[in-house]
Structures are given as C-alpha cells and as structure tokens.
Amino acid sequence: MPDSYAKALWVTIQRGAKSKEAVESIRQILERDGRMALLPRIVRSLQRHAAREGRREGVVLSVARQEDARRARSEIGGLLPEMGIRKDEVTTQIDEHLIGGWRLEGRDRLADASYKKYLLDMYNAATKS
Amino acid sequence: MDSSAVEKIIKEIEGYAPTVEHRHIGRVTSVGDGVVAIDGLSKAVMSEIVEFEETGKRTLLRAMEVEGSLFGLVLNLEEDGVRAVILGDTARVYEGMTVKSTGRILSVPASEELLGRVVNALGEPIDGKSAFSNTTMMPVERQAAGVIDRKPVSVPLQTGIKAIDSMIPIGRGQRELIIGDRGTGKTTVAIDAIINQKNEPKGNRPVCIYVAIGQKESKTARIVQQLRNEGALDYTIIVDAPASAPAALQFLAPYSGVAIGEYFMDQGRDVLIIYDDLSKQAVAYRELSLLLRRPPGREAYPGDIFYLHSRLLERAARLSDEKGGGSITALPIIETQEGDVSGYIPTNVISITDGQMFLITDLFNKGIRPAIDVGISVSRVGSNAQTKAMKAVAGGLKLELAQFRELEAFMQFAQDLDKATADRIESGRRMVEVLKQKNGAPIPIEKQIAVLYAAGQKFFSDVAVAQVTRVEARLIEFLDGQISKTLAEIRKSGQLSDASKKQLDKAIEEFRLAHPELFSRTKL
C-alpha cells in the first residue's frame, strides 16, 4: 500500500501538480482515512521510486580515461537518436575497469564497445568452446 | 599454458571482429527464493531468457573467473518491470545487478550425442563426460501438433509386462498414466518398459527419455546403473532435476525432456518419454507461482495448473506421414496419497491422458506385482494398439479376471461350490499367477503370446498355484530352445497362424511329457 501511495504521488507530480500541494493532499487523505502511520513508509517508497526513475531516465557514458571521452562522444553520436536520447542528457563517468572504449547505459538500453567486453568475448570463445 | 590453448587464443584474436553490443537491459531490485524482480526490460516477452551481468563491476581478471553465464527465465510481465526465475546459483545475483535481454526463448540442445547421457533441465551434461559439440536448439515451449498433422495410434509400444501388453495395451503416440501410492512399483513399470525396447529391432526401437523430477539423486543413480547393466542406456536420455534443484528447474524439466523428444520425432523416429513424476512438477510450479505473487486457487495451486500438464502431454503425438510419421509416447507418473484418485492433480491428469493404470498398495503387499488393478485400469486406444496374435490370446482375459474377482469374494461366504464355479476360481488363481512378473525382467511379445496361449489352453490347470510362476519360466526357456523360429515368426508377422498354433501345441505337449513332476496339482 505505501508503494501505491508513493507511485500515485509521483505520477501526480509528473503530470504537473506542484509538489507541496500534492504532498499536502496526500497528508490530508491519510489523516482522513486514519492512515498517518503509513507516512514514513510512503516517503521511503517515494525515495526509492525517485532513485529508480532517475536511474532509468539518466544516461551514463562510461569511459576508462578522461582522454577517451571526446572520441567516445563522437562514436555514440549515431546511436543517440535511435535510443531517444539527446546529447545534453548524457553524463560521462570514469570506469577504469573498462580498460578502453566506452559503454553507454540508459533508458533501459545498453551499448557496450568497451575493451573489457571484447577481451572477455575472446577469452570465453577460446576457453569455453 | 599449453601451446594448443595459445594457438586457440591467437586464432581468436586474428579472427575477432569487434561489434558494439546492443541490448535492452533492466536492473535487479530484489532477489529471494530464486525469484528476481527486475526494473526495466520493457521489451521483454514471456519465457524470454535474460542474462545476469556478473562481470559489470569486476576487473577483467575477476570477470574471467566467472564460471559460465547465469541466466533467468521471465515468467511475469508487470507494469514497471518483470519477474524472472534464476536458472542456476541464486547466490550469484545481487540487488542492483544489470540484467540483459537475449531476445531468445528458452531452448535446450538436442542431438544423437545425448543418447546415453544424463543432462539437467537446461540440457547441460551432468554425468561428468564431455560437453555436446553438435546440437540443434529445440524450444522448451512449443505448440503441440494440430489435428491435421496427426495420425491415429495403431502401432503397439510393447512394455514387456504381460498385464499391460495383454489388457491395457499402449500404442505409439499415446499418453498412458501410471498412478498409485508411493512404493507401489510405478517407476519399476516405467523402467521395465524402457528396458524392453532393447528387444525391438534397431530400426524400430524408440528413443527413450526418462525425466526425473524432484527425485532423490540416489534413486536416479540407481536407475542409470540399472539401464546401463541391462544395455538400455545406449538408447536412453536421462533428464534430471533432483529434489535439491531449484523449483524452476523441476518445473522446466518435463518440457526440456519433450523438447529433446521432438527433435527425434521430427526426424520420423519414435520416442518413449517417462515423466517421474508430475505430482512433483505441480508442487514445484505451485511454489514458483506463489513466489511470483500469482493468486493461489484450489489447494494453493495457481489457476493454470491444468494448462501446465495439458500443454505438456499434448506434445505426445503420432505424426502423419506428411510430417514424418514420428511419435512421442508419454508415460506420466502421478503419486496419490492413500489411494485418493479423486485428488485435484490426479483427476486433472486422468482427464488429459488416453488411459491410466492404477497400482494398488493392497495388491503390492499381497505379492501381486506389478500391482496393477486391471479392473479399473484402461487404455482408451485399446486393441488398436495390439498385434492380431495378442488380441487372439488376450481377448477374454479381462472378463475372465473380472469374473474371478467376483467369485473370489463370493467364495468367502459359500461353503459348497459347483464344479464349474470351482474350476473358474482355480483357473482365475492361476491366471493371476501367470500375470505376475519380476521387476527388471520384461518379456518379449512373442513369449508373452506363447505363455498366454498356453494359459488359454488350460496348460496350468494341473500345476499347483504356488508353482505357476516357476513352471512358466521353465516353459519359456523350453519354447525358446525348441521353437525359436516359430516365436520369431509370431514376432515378425504379429499373427498367430494355424501353423504356429500347431507348433506351440506340440512344444507344450513335449514339455508336459518331459516334466510330469510339475503337473501334480495340489488343491488348496
């Protein structure tokens, strides 16, 4: 039930309602129904929901070194329209484990052109076949 | 590292063409009891295989240590994500893990290489021998053949068990249920049916698949050893989802088994598949469904529990000549509790199959083994799946036994019986003895016919009841030595010609004259 309240609150805000007013409405509803005890759980659920939506909507380009970022951004240029992503929505982060290349993750999509993936593919093909 | 491995890696490097991997992904939000809630995967379809990315947060060296990919099976499509069952070690999955879609529906490898092997529900070898190299991937879920693609069942599948082949005959493409309490010999009947297939000529011999669901590994190991000792393992595939396997694998195992069977059926070959047992598959599916938060119904089983078994058993069929003429004969096993055949799962499966054989604890305890109650057992295919020779000798058997049972009950109250009734009772007692059979000793069809012919000629009427089994064994040995050509002819033609009958009569008389000591009947 707290999840349902949290989701309803999220959707209401997404549809354009002001956050303060939406929260006040929920508080009044909970008070009317005698369910104020649910409020802390609703807040936690809302935080989880917000984090999840943030992860889903967020687009992260991972590169092994800062110097690789520019080249990676030019290589992903053709992919972004396919994935429904604008260039300015992409944030870059450093992940040394990739060794080289890049990895684009976001909007429930993954495009992986990292050296780590290539090396793992070769290793698996050579040793597990 | 040896030079061959180095060569292999060099080849891989030289031949490698890097491509960007594009996948739809999700993220694990919760995991427990083998079920994973995944956020995302908006394009996932039902029964799709998803891959858990264990290497994501690891260094390359640590990633190389990961043993094999870990997959999951999507079973619930929800508004914000999906729920999947883990097909492997659940300890490898953690919250926040990336999950990639594969776009593939679950499939298992199938080929001739699987004959003689033991595999798990995913088709992976678990008998310590080599991996399969040249296989065809067969979908675990597949639509059963339609009406037009089928042919009526008319070719017998000989089980080698007299009580079954004479009175509850099974045909290739039929579904015949084996149902009874624990410890009544259900698995024994099924294994004897597999062993008896070695008596079939190679061109006519069905591929046998034994699916062990929720069984003790010691029992499965014993069965494998028995099949190996009897020379039956060469044409048998064992699919094993033991009691220690996750519920997902116990649920999948029968479908994997029939998928492997369909590989051979599509090539025009016959297959015999045994599901031991579907009660355990139902329990595993109930467990999965409750964990997937599906609403429970009667006895907490999900609403689609009937469909679980009906779609499995419908895949047993005999295909038309246009489709290759292959067949899958299914012998599902159901375990009842205290003989209750009106339970939910037993009644479901009884209504799906083309007949059932009831194994009764009382009969088993009385020493009547196989403990089949022929009065209530039925094969809906019936004599369509019997050779003419067997029909000729077994035609009146069921009625004779039914009448004997009635008279046996009546005898407890009556003091003096007329001669006709007394003879019928004596004859019935001897027939019950004739139908007894040791486990692990299936009898080829021509010898069954010979024995039943002899019984029909009142051969055993002068044999003491307690000696019937011994005399029968000696008779079979004698006939095998004296008229093997006649027996081979009966087997080949499927008919009991007048000439064959004369040969049998002559041989039986010779046996009687050679062993007069066996025919001094002592009345009880």
Image (cartoon, rainbow, N blue to C red):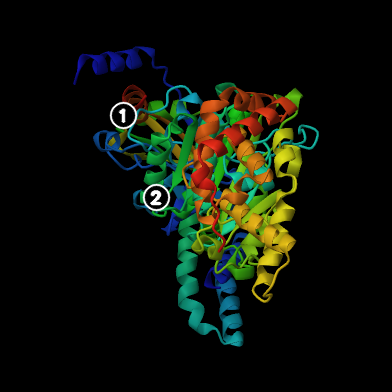
**Marking on residue B219:** 2
Q: Going 38% across and 13% down the picture, which residue do you hit?
A: B15
Q: Going 50% across and 40% down the picture, which residue do you hit?
A: B515
SS for tag 1?
loop
Q: Quadrant of the N terminus of chain B?
A: top left
**Marking on residue B388:** none
Snapshot quadrant of residue B358: bottom right
Nearer to us in this view, B101 or B169: B169
Estimate the x, y position of residue B349 in percent, counting from the top left.
66, 55
Q: Does label 2 lie on the same chain as label 1? A: no
Q: Chain of mark 1?
A: A
SS for tag 2?
helix
**Image: A84 above or below B498:** below
Estimate the x, y position of residue B153 in percent, counting from the top left.
74, 36
| Residue type, label 1 | Glu
Nearer to us in this view, B224 or B483: B483
**Image: B177 above or below B58:** below
Nearer to us in this view, B95 or B329: B329
| Residue type, label 2 | Lys
Nearer to us in this view, B91 or B349: B349
From the viewer's perspective, tell me whether residue A116 is left or right of residue B391. left
Estimate the x, y position of residue B33 in percent, counting from the top left.
43, 59
The number of numbered discs placed on residues in the rendered structure image is 2
The residue at the far left in this view is B1
**Image: B81 above or below B193:** below
Dot 1: within a 10 Å radius of its alpha carbon, few (fewer than 14), some, or many (20 or more) residues?
Answer: few
Snapshot quadrant of residue A33: bottom right
